[in-house]
Image (cartoon, rainbow, N blue to C red):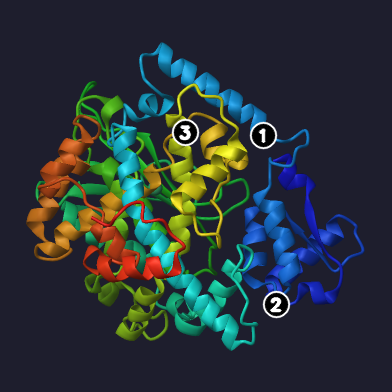
Amino acid sequence: MAEEADSILILKTEQDLSGLPASLREAAQTTAATRQMAVAGIITNTRSSIDPFLTYSDQRALRKKAWRMFTNRGDNSNSHDNNAIITQILQLRAERAKLLGYPTHAHLRLDNTMMKSPEKAMALMEEMWAPAVARVHEEVADMLALAKKEGAPATFKIEPWDYRYYAEKVRKDRYDLDQNEVKQYLQLDKMREGMFWVAGELFNFTFIPVTDVPVYHPDVKVWQVNDKTTGQQVGLWYFDPYARPGKNSGAWMNAYRKQERLDGNVTTIVSNNANFIKGKEGEPVLISWTDATTLFHEFGHALHGLSSNVTYPSLSGTSVVRDYVEFPSQLLENWLPTPEVLNRFALHYQSGQPIPQTLVDRINKASTFNEGFATTEFLASALIDMKLHLAGDKVIDPDKFERETLAELGMPHELVMRHRTPQFSHVFSSDGYSAGYYSYLWSVVLAADGFSAFTEAGGPYDKVVAARLRQHIFTVGNTIDPAVGYRAFRGRDPKIEALMKQRGFPLASEKASRSSAKKRTGKTKATTSVK
Ligand SMILES: [Zn+2]
């Protein structure tokens, strides 16, 4: 935090602002004014200012400076250098694991997860690594071609501070999608109705607005959720959609009361919270595609809570293991792009016409853009996290460990870990995600594979698959082993193929041509294969 607050990038002249969109330019100017510095602008050392700067700045030397400043946080041989304390944390974690009877901290942390063993988590990550890296090489080739078309010399190479910049150019060139055009079809109220409709189809729920329950703010609206067939109440759903001073940013789900039968038949009270900007009275609130996806995601958590049918509150609803809790929510995101939802609920706010298929096709096409970069920067961090915690009580020099491990993995030189070791707060600010950064990937593997259970059967609204989903996943909370529950739902263990397809990665059938391409460039080591 100190290094984010202390270091800044000074933009001295108007030319240093070249390429920046108006909003970023203004932010840089405001920061300079706030700090009372007579310069053209200031970029602070946080992800939310550095990433856009790297995406838009035409000044390569400044991009390099910004990238260096950001990726070296906590690694500057000063009083805020985290390397020594990381060595110490790793030693203490290894010692504690031994005291508790586990070979390493990774084994201790994974014991109470769906994955169960670090070896299985490593196998998953290694299986994804080669195709993700192969996709990076394709992305780099696309960027290089574009740079040369724009007049870059023959010797020009994409460096880590160039990736976001050229990726943005490729995006504009090939996948351009006008978010404002999409927004006109996404009215918040209609999207909420769409979610209710999906919940009716898959979960047999019906939503009835109620006004006779207490709310903590007038913006909060409440619905009673009933089983369509029996008419029995399963819970209350609170919706708090708008931003206001003092409210947390982002979107989340809460359970104010958990379903249980320990103390009578207690139904749940859940909420979904977001930060949309409230429109004028009577005007529809238009939201982005990403926001609509988030809405479905959080509603997935809510449905997980509402479906719960267990005895003990500690095992109820979303009280499941770390690498499983995001599965129901990630899964639900898949119903937004179904024609059943789009044709009924993604209606133009003026004409009432459903979103045109050509626009949906463009959204789908853009969804795989730059996934090589995103997956590889994520996996590099997840692999380092796991390897650091599998090393046992060996004394670790984090810098050296990171450098050597990435070289062994064949990390493409054009990008860097999403979180380098000295700034990896998921893993070192608490135990929370230590040996657990992989779980973000695991839940998307489950979600993609789980959704394909529907598409392989009768489609997204297949009643038989939906019944299995409820029976083995949504109703059981933490009362059964998630691996057993998943198998009962899916008929087999999860596979990564559906996610690979979703992210536009080369599939196993294309393996032969890919590996020969790799040999030609000589950039990746053939460590793992695509199974
Ligand atoms: Zn979530």
Residue on which disc 2 sits: 19
Q: Which residue is mark 3?
A: 434
Foreground tag (3 vs 1): 1
Say which quarter of the image contains residue 464.
Answer: bottom left
Indicate the amino acid at tag 2: Gly
Whole-angstrom CA distance, mark 1 to mark 2, is: 34 Å
Q: For the residues marked 3 and 1, what is the alpha-carbon distance in whole angstroms?
A: 16 Å
Q: Residue at x 31, y 35 (%)?
A: 119
Report if the CB atoms under discs 3 and 1 are less than 8 Å apart.
no
Q: Is residue 231 visible?
A: no
Residue at figure coordinates x 20%, y 32% from the top left: 481
Which quadrant does the C terminus fall into?
A: bottom left
Report if the beta carbon of the residue with label 2 is closer than 8 angstroms to ligand 1: no
Please tell me which of labels 1 and 2 falls first in the chain: 2
Q: Which residue is mark 1?
A: 82
Mark 3 neighbour class, 10 Å CA radius: few under 14, some 14 to 19, many 20 or more: many
Residue 449 x %, y %: 22, 55
Q: Residue furthest left?
A: 464
Amino acid type assigned to the residue bearing label 3 in the image: Ser
Q: Earlier in the sequence, mark 2 or mark 3?
A: 2
Is 477 positioned to the left or the right of 96 in the image?
Answer: left
Other-residue count near label 2 (Cα within 10 Å), few / some / many at <14 / 14–19 / ≥20:
some
Q: Locate the N terminus by quadrant.
A: top right
